[in-house]
Image (cartoon, grey):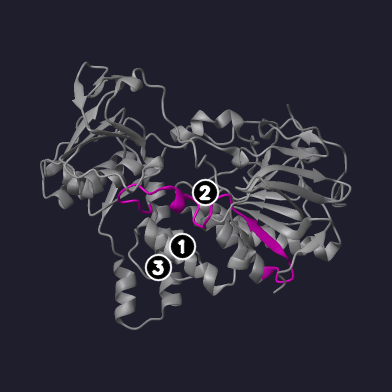
Amino acid sequence: MATAAVQQAGVNHFDVVIVGAGISGIGSAYHLQEQCPGKTYAILEMKETFGGTWETHKYPGVRSDSDLYTFGYRFKPWVGTPIASGAEILKYMGEVIEENGIAPHIRYGHRIAACSFDSKAGLWTVDATTADGATHRFTCNFLWMCQGYYDHENPYVPEWPGRERYKGLFVHAQQWDPAIDYAGKRILVIGSGATAATVIPAFAEKAAHVTMLQRSPTYFFCSENKNELADRLREIGIDEPTIHRVVRAQIMYDQNMMTERCKSEPDTVFEDLKELVRAFTGKPDFQFEPHFTPRYRVWQQRLAFCPEGDIFRAAVAGKLTVHTDTLDSFTEKGVRTSSGEEIEADIIVAATGFRLSVMGNIPFAVDGKPVDWADTVTYRGMMFTGVPNMCWVMGYFRASWTLRVDMQADFICNLLNHMDAIGAKRVEAALRPEDEGMEILPWIESDNFNPGYLMRGIDQMPRRGDKPEWRHNQDYWAERGEFPKIDLDAPEFIYDGKRSAKVSTAKVAVPA
């Protein structure tokens, strides 16, 4: 495996620069080493360690909201419980780094300040700064963006009136300090999504009481935190790689069936979800109105996993009180809701979600012209018109994020090898003559998927067309069949400024 960079006048040159040492970046590095063994590469990470989102979030109980058999990489078997803690995920990632010699490639503490592409040279220039104020310049032939989709330093906090009046501790879950002592405290959690569902049961173990204030409820899928198939296969002596492969297939099949049921029989699915809650709480008369009956349809947002029904058990045990209302203002002792109710708390935790960060908020330019991502059209949610030699890893929201990390890596490695085979220095996705007049739409279909963090920043995102090639459809079960069949000589790919001879090279303008 080649690891050395080419030094030219203080510039580090690599074949590939991967941005981010989180779950996407580490998985992508593994695939690059395996599928393109001659390529030199570096991973630029702004933090001082690996982990990405699992390093950012340190709130009590932090855990995956996807099962680790599919959230884990396809190449490394997961041997723990399906839902795992942040610490267990970091340990798993650390093993991947150590087992595959990835550590020497990671440049920690490198915050990227700008990325610019020179079409004549076929090179990206990446400028990064370190904590000592020094600037480090890298060049690369290909830029692999694995930095995720949200701002790790600035979470989303609504502009609530009177927050300065509150005398207790206010903190967003994303900025939680593990040193905070919450034992015996009254805690108010604002929010109802996966973060709230994770932190509330953990708080309930030691807090005097926990209150959840939500604008609207969330759908939860309650289940034991175990996989019976995996346990049975281990019992009869099947090897871990086989267990990993078989259990992944089983889970993905079950998830697909659930997704289809959510669309075809949503009311029946909700009744099934209710029965699971009743079973785990031991309360056949558990009341779902008004605090546990969502207003949106079950297919429109991610179905949050609730191991052992823990948030519902906290409610039944009297450790959790739920208010479904909006926040009118903060007071000295807590908050006042729009209905006039006062909620007092020693600690208020905002579980209000992310602030979208497109390409890490890094300034990009191509041949000196700044890139406005909202002016580009996406190719399958990973390449963008007018931006050569770059891919963005954007995973799944309904299925495990990492399923797409693995799949995109296959595509990118195939693309890099294809470019070598044809002697191309530059590749970009471009609309074809037959795409002229195609309707250009927002990034994602909000009727089918509409989480708040995405809807708040949708205008910043690249746009999509109404054809499969120009969409990010969030459908793993369709893409797993489509991606291996992508024709790298298809007319949507332009190499060194030339379109495939298969079609006309008539110029197509990207719609404004």
Q: Is 231 placed above or below 169 here?
A: below
Q: Residues within 10 Å of mark 2 (few under 14, many from 20)?
A: some
Task: Identify the secondary structure beneath mark 2.
Answer: loop
Q: Can I make out residue 427 in this image? A: no
Q: Position of residue 35 (x, y in %)?
A: 67, 69
Residue 44 within the magenta-colored segment of the rendering: yes
Q: Which residue corresponds to the image point at 22% horizontal and 29% vertical from the top-left?
A: 323
User: Distance from label 3 to label 1 (Cα)?
Assistant: 12 Å
Residue 338 within the magenta-colored segment of the rendering: no
Q: Can I make out residue 178 in this image? A: yes
User: Distance from label 3 to label 2 (Cα)?
Assistant: 20 Å
Q: Position of residue 412 (x, y in %)?
A: 68, 58
* Quadrant in the picture for the N terminus: bottom right
- Which is nearer the N-term, disc 3 or disc 1? 1
Q: Residues within 10 Å of mark 3 (few under 14, many from 20)?
A: some
Q: Position of residue 172 (x, y in %)?
A: 37, 36
**In the visual, does 170 lie left or right of 339?**
right
**In the visual, does 43 lie left or right of 220?**
right
Q: Amino acid at mark 3?
A: Val
Q: Which residue corresponds to the image point at 35% horizontal and 68% vertical from the top-left?
A: 80
Task: Identify the secondary structure beneath mark 1.
Answer: loop
| Labels 1, 2: front one | 1
Q: Circle 3 sits on which residue?
A: 247
Q: Which residues are magenta?
A: 35-64
Q: Circle 2 sits on which residue?
A: 475
Q: Position of residue 73 (x, y in %)?
A: 50, 64
Q: Amino acid at mark 2?
A: Asp
Q: Which mark is residue 416?
A: none
| Labels 3, 1: front one | 1
Q: Is 246 placed above or below 176 here?
A: below
